[in-house]
Structures are given as structure tokens and as C-alpha cells.
Image (cartoon, helix red, strand yellow):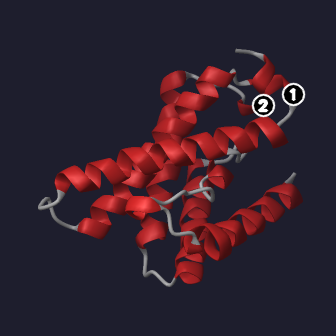
């Protein structure tokens, strides 16, 4: 289980840093697949370790993308959102989560992550409409890609229970 998560971490960080960060989408949109690592960590992961792993995954993507701290902060915030969402939704096990719960779980974590990235990147409210467009669009794209990856690579019981 630990080896699988370490392998998943390196694969997702590589895909994010080497492939997705280099793709030029229209309107400066971005897809953030590396937070899938945070979403799939075991339910029993202690909060301190989850926040540390979120920071580490973001720091690796920062290094690969040549950015200083933007992804590290946003991934840490995404990990914090995961903790809050799981407690609020009273999810006891991520292996047996229903599809709609996984979708909303993914959407909220992606929304928090995208909002942090684009608000920090803009660091102003002068183009708030465009920043809001980037947040919503990148959240939708990231959520779709993560849910698709989950449908392809996750155990059958997750996407059979709608």
C-alpha cells in the first residue's frame, strides 16, 4: 500500500510537471491532475501526514514547473479541504465511496485548489471576472480528468454504486 502511494505520487507529479504543465490550453486554462494523489490517500492517514504530503506533492510540482511555492500552498490547502470534507460528509472509507460522493469530493477539493492557485497568481481583484472564469473552468477540467482516471484505474466498487 505504501509502495503503491509512492509510485502514484511520482507518476502523477511527473505527468503534471512534464506533460500537463507544458500543454497550452485556450484562455490560459490548466488541468491539475497531481491532486488526485491527495484524494486517493487512505482514509486513515493522520491529518499531519496528509498536510505534509500535500505540501510535498505541491513542492515537487513547483520544482518541475519552475514556480516558487504556488503549488505547495495550493496542494496543502487541498489536503486541508479533504480533511474537512471527509469529516463533514462523515465518510468512513474511501474504498467504498459512491460515485456521486466521489464526484463532489473531487469537485470541492479541485475548486479550493484552483481558487488558491489563480487568486495567488493574480494577487489582485482587477481582473476578477477572468480569474473566476479560470477557477471554474480549471476546476471542471480537473474534476472531469480525475473522475475519468478514477473510473479507469479504481476498483470496480467505486463507480458501480451510483
Q: State the SS at label 1.
A: helix
- Residue at the outermost front position: 26
Q: Which x, y percent locates residue 162? A: 70, 15
Circle 1 or circle 2, nearest the eye: 1
Mark positioned earlier in the residue sequence (1 or 2): 2
| Residue placed under numbered mark 2 in the picture | 95
Location of residue 140 in the rendering, given as x and y in whole percent from the top left corner: 49, 42
User: Relative to 160, is 20 above or below?
Assistant: below
Determine which quarter of the picture holds residue 16.
Answer: bottom right
Secondary structure beneath label 2: helix
Report the residue at 20% width, 50% height from top.
129
Say if residue 86 shows up in the picture: no
Residue 35 locus on image (x, y percent): 59, 54
Q: CA distance from mark 1 to mark 2?
A: 10 Å
Task: Give the class, few, some or many, for how many residues have Cα within 10 Å of label 1's Cα (few <14, many ≥20).
Answer: few
Q: Which residue is mark 1?
A: 156
Image quarter of residue 51: bottom right
Residue 123 in sight here: yes
**Residue sitting at x 88%, y 61%:** 3
Circle number at residue 136: none
Viewer-side residue, 2 vs 16: 16
Task: Give the answer, above or below, for where 12 lies relative to 149.
Answer: below
Q: Is residue 25 above or below residue 148?
A: below
Q: Residues within 10 Å of mark 2 (few under 14, many from 20)?
A: some
User: Looking at the image, which residue is at 49% across and 51% down?
Assistant: 78
Q: Position of residue 154 (x, y in %)?
A: 82, 38
Amino acid at each position: 500500500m505504501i509502495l503503491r502511494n509512492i509510485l502514484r505520487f511520482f507518476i502523477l507529479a511527473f505527468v503534471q510537471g512534464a506533460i500537463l504543465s507544458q500543454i497550452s490550453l485556450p484562455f490560459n486554462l490548466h488541468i491539475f491532475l497531481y491532486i488526485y494523489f491527495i484524494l486517493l490517500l487512505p482514509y486513515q492517514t493522520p491529518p499531519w501526514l496528509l498536510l505534509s504530503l500535500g505540501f510535498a506533492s505541491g513542492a515537487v510540482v513547483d520544482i518541475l514547473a519552475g514556480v516558487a511555492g504556488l503549488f505547495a500552498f495550493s496542494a496543502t490547502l487541498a489536503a486541508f479541504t479533504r480533511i474537512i470534507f471527509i469529516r463533514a460528509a462523515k465518510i468512513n472509507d474511501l474504498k467504498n465511496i459512491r460515485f456521486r460522493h466521489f464526484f463532489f469530493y473531487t469537485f470541492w477539493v479541485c475548486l479550493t485548489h484552483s481558487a488558491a492557485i489563480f487568486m495567488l497568481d493574480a494577487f489582485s481583484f482587477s481582473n476578477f471576472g477572468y480569474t473566476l472564469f479560470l477557477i471554474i473552468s480549471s476546476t471542471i477540467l480537473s474534476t472531469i480528468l480525475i473522475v475519468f482516471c478514477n473510473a479507469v484505474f479504481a476498483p470496480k466498487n467505486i463507480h458501480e454504486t451510483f
